Amino acid sequence: MASSGDPEFVKRAKNHQFEGLTKDLEGEWQGPFVFIQAADTQYGMINDWEGRGDGNEWEEEISLTKKAIHAANTMEPRPKFFIVCGDLVHAWPGGKYREEQERDLKATFTALRSDVPLVCVCGNHDVGNSPTQESIIKYRHSWGDDYFSFWVGGVKFLVINSSYYPSNYSDPSVVGELKNEHDAWLDAELEEAKNSDCKHLVVFQHIPWFLTSVDEDNEYFNIDRDVRKTMLAKFKEAGVRTIFCGHYHRNAGAFYDNMEHVITSAIGCQLGKDKSGLRVVKVTEDAVAHQYYDMDSIPQKVDF
């Protein structure tokens, strides 16, 4: 596939913060707002999944991403940010088409209006099922930090790297030191949140902790049960209100006590009955409400 060139991509996730969305600038509640949560643009997967190639074609994903960007650009009120919860592209680290897919995804997102920051979360396809130090470094070089915090209108958001947690198919032991740094950072951020006056605390990640029940068996689309229970208890104690994920290529989710665990289907390839789409999230003083829309039904005006 022909590449769209090598567009300049400004990496704003640095030093575990997101440039322009810091507590100093955005730590105060400023009233209700909207943001876009999406997942799995995964350029190349449709072609691969449908057996039409080996991931060598991603025009369909480009078209779907353009629709999502147009919806964000024309939405009222303006979304405060547009976040993609992992699997930005389909090719594995170092794999065939990887550079071309990343280049085309960045080129597509240059159309996103400049006052709607693009926030990227790393997925297993972005750093590998069993990540290595090299794959993490390459991701950071291309997209920015793989974990960080940011603030919008008095709400604190945490982006974590779910590939540091074991599952049926992943083994993060090779990156033990990087995982320890991630976990120490996360503990400090959660502790800080307990002592802050943030209106809500929200987590973004790629791989869901669970699909329907915290007690469900381990499988491809969730994280190890023992680890999941430990982490969910930690999030609950810190006051996390909502966790947004991707990875499943279907919509799903449930509650862990009063903490909502939301799984959003893909902008790209679908593995269930949902259509390609995104989630519109409305944040008010008392709630983090959300609705998934397919590409042809995304509202132009969002009412509170």
Image: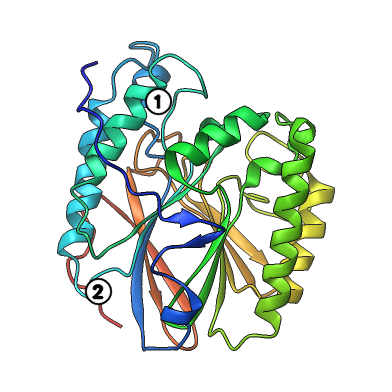
Q: Position of residue 86 (x, y in %)?
A: 48, 43
222 and 66: which is toward the camera: 66
Determine the image quadrant of residue 237: bottom right
- Sequence-earlier tag: 2 or 1: 1
138 and 260: which is toward the camera: 138
For badge 1, the amino acid type reads: Met
Residue that carries the numbered disc 1 in the rendered image: 45
Within 10 Å of disc 2 (Cα), the crowding (few <14, some 14-19, many 20+) is: some
For the point 40% across and 43% down, which residue is it?
266
Colour mode of the rendering? rainbow
Q: Position of residue 245 (x, y in %)?
A: 54, 52
For the point 40% across and 12% down, which residue is it?
54
Where is 103 relative to 118, above or below? above
- Residue situated furthest front in the rendering: 15
Within 10 Å of disc 1 (Cα), the crowding (few <14, some 14-19, many 20+) is: many
Q: Which mark, by number, is residue 302?
A: 2
Locate the N terminus by quadrant: top left
